Amino acid sequence: MYELSPSILAADFTCLGEQLAKLEAAGVRWVHLDVMDGMFVPSISFGMPVIASLRKQSKLFFDVHLMVEEPQRYIEAFRDCGADSLTVHAEACRHLDGTLRQIRAAGMRPAVALNPATPLCSLDHVLGLVDMVLLMTVNPGFGGQSFLPESLPKIRSLRKLLEETGRPVDIQVDGGINEETLPAVLEAGANIIVAGSAVFGEDIPGRVERLTGMMREHQGT
């Protein structure tokens, strides 16, 4: 399964509902919602009220990425506001396995994120608990950063591990993804692609079509 998950962090916040409607009309099925608490990362973005408001207007799959310290405090609240998938950072959880179990028990798709410098061995005891691993390809906290090419070997290693173990886990990438960097991350083994500034702006349908077209082409090879 290949999916484009546009990050609304790059959207026009004066008309978020309209922006989501454009994504749906363009054939997008997922949308990425970055929640930042000002502690795990320096920035503060938005929280449950915004997500709940968007849920009323959209049928998209809500791919919620928590850049939040001790996120287990908010799992039920994010379920109640409409999250379909909840990604927590390994670096932010005191008891990562318990947090992931709690997400699944709450009825959401559990996922774990790793920062660029966090090694894959952090997944050793939780890979069987997740549906997706998010490998950050920039350091989290700010949109518009440049892709870190040293992330590619990490994506390849995770894809190899998943193939060897037969685990049906998606690999998501987030950070600096655009038409120039997308081919490399697809070739490395990512299948869920987060893109912000590469999607939002002038001609959202055209931008979506170019990115999803590249993904369809790769999937067909």
Image (spheres, rainbow, N blue to C red):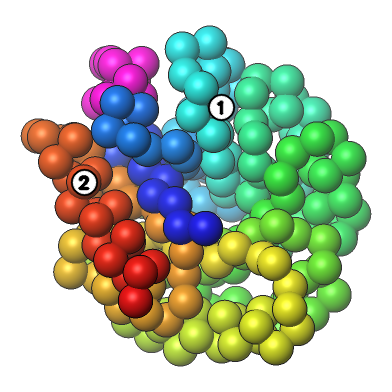
Instruction: Say whether residue 39 is visible.
Output: no
Membership of 96 in magenta stretch: no
Q: Residue at x 32, y 60 (%)?
A: 216
Labelled disc at residue 182: none
> What percent of the width, then of the height, locates residue 174?
42, 59
**Height in image: 180 above or below 80?**
below
Q: Which residue is mark 1?
A: 47
> What percent of the width, then of the height, locates residue 30?
47, 39
Front of the two marks 2 and 1: 2
Q: Residue at x 73, y 20 (%)?
A: 80
Tell me which amino acid carries mark 2.
Answer: Glu
Quarter holding the C terminus?
A: bottom left
Helix or strand or loop: what does disc 2 sit on?
A: helix
Q: Residue at x 27, y 33 (%)?
A: 26
Q: In the drawing, does residue 176 fall left or right of residue 78?
A: left
- Which residue range is magenta in the image? 12-22
> What percent of the width, then of the height, locates residue 181?
25, 70
Instruction: Identify the main secondary structure in magenta.
Output: helix
Using the image as rendered, state which of residue 119 and residue 37 is in the foreground: 119
Using the image as rendered, state which of residue 34 and residue 168 is in the foreground: 168
Instruction: Say whether residue 106 is visible.
Output: yes
Quadrant of residue 45 within the rendered picture: top left
Q: Which residue is mark 2?
A: 209
Q: Residues within 10 Å of mark 1 (few under 14, many from 20)?
A: some
Helix or strand or loop: what does disc 1 sit on?
A: loop
Tell me which amino acid carries mark 1.
Answer: Gly
Q: Residues within 10 Å of mark 2 (few under 14, many from 20)?
A: some
